[in-house]
Amino acid sequence: CCYFLAIAHCTERGWFGQGCKYRCHCENNKCDITSGQCLNNAKCARGWFGSTCQYQDLATILSATVTTNPWQKADWLTDSNDYHCNSDSKLKSIGVAWNSPQSFSWLKI
């Protein structure tokens, strides 16, 4: 009996994974063509996150409106830094609204 293992690499820049079905969302579009990990210590491009940058931050897309009560500048919500948090103990609520329907599978606050 014989076994044959073929490993196909994506030839089109900016794609990775089996069947080249995942788009690279690393800074400068530089990903490992097999694993999708960002190369040379690059981070995810703005608006993307996760181990291979496959999750989109819906608060950073152009159609999103972020509101706070009471009003405050909320750059910490969309700066792609998991270590930046709200430090205002008077903040009562945060709202995110889009001008078109958005699908999501989970929410991180």
Image (cartoon, rainbow, N blue to C red):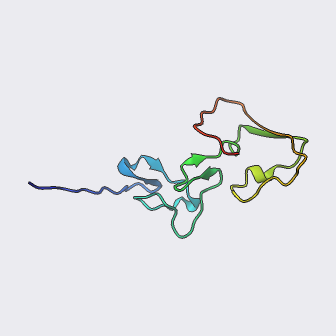
Q: Is residue 38 left or right of residue 57?
A: left
Whole-percent x, y for residue 98 in the image: 71, 33
Residue at 78%, 53% (x, y): give it.
Answer: 76
Closest to the observer, 58 or 27: 58
Is 42 rendered above or below residue 70?
A: below
Along the viewing direction, whichever of 4 and 83 lies nearer the viewer: 83
**Horizontal arrangement in the rendering, residue 27 relative to residue 59 (left or right):** left
Q: What residue is at 57 percent from the left and 47 percent from the top?
A: 55
Indicate the quadrant containing the N terminus: top left, top right, bottom left or bottom right.
bottom left
In this rendering, is residue 79 above or below 57? below
For the view shown, which residue lies furthest in the front direction? 89
Q: Quadrant of residue 80?
A: bottom right
Q: Is residue 99 left or right of residue 86?
A: left
Is 6 left, or right, of 81 in this rendering? left
Residue found at the very far left of the displayed protein: 1
Residue 47, horizontal then vertical, whole percent: 65, 50
Residue 71 x, y percent position in the rendering: 90, 43
Which image quarter holds the C terminus?
Answer: top right
Measured as percent of width and height from the top left, residue 52 is found at 52, 55
User: Hey, which residue is sitting farthest bottom in the picture?
Assistant: 40
Instruction: Kindly indicate the quadrant of the structure image that contains residue 65.
Output: top right
Q: Residue at 59% x, 57% y: name it.
A: 44
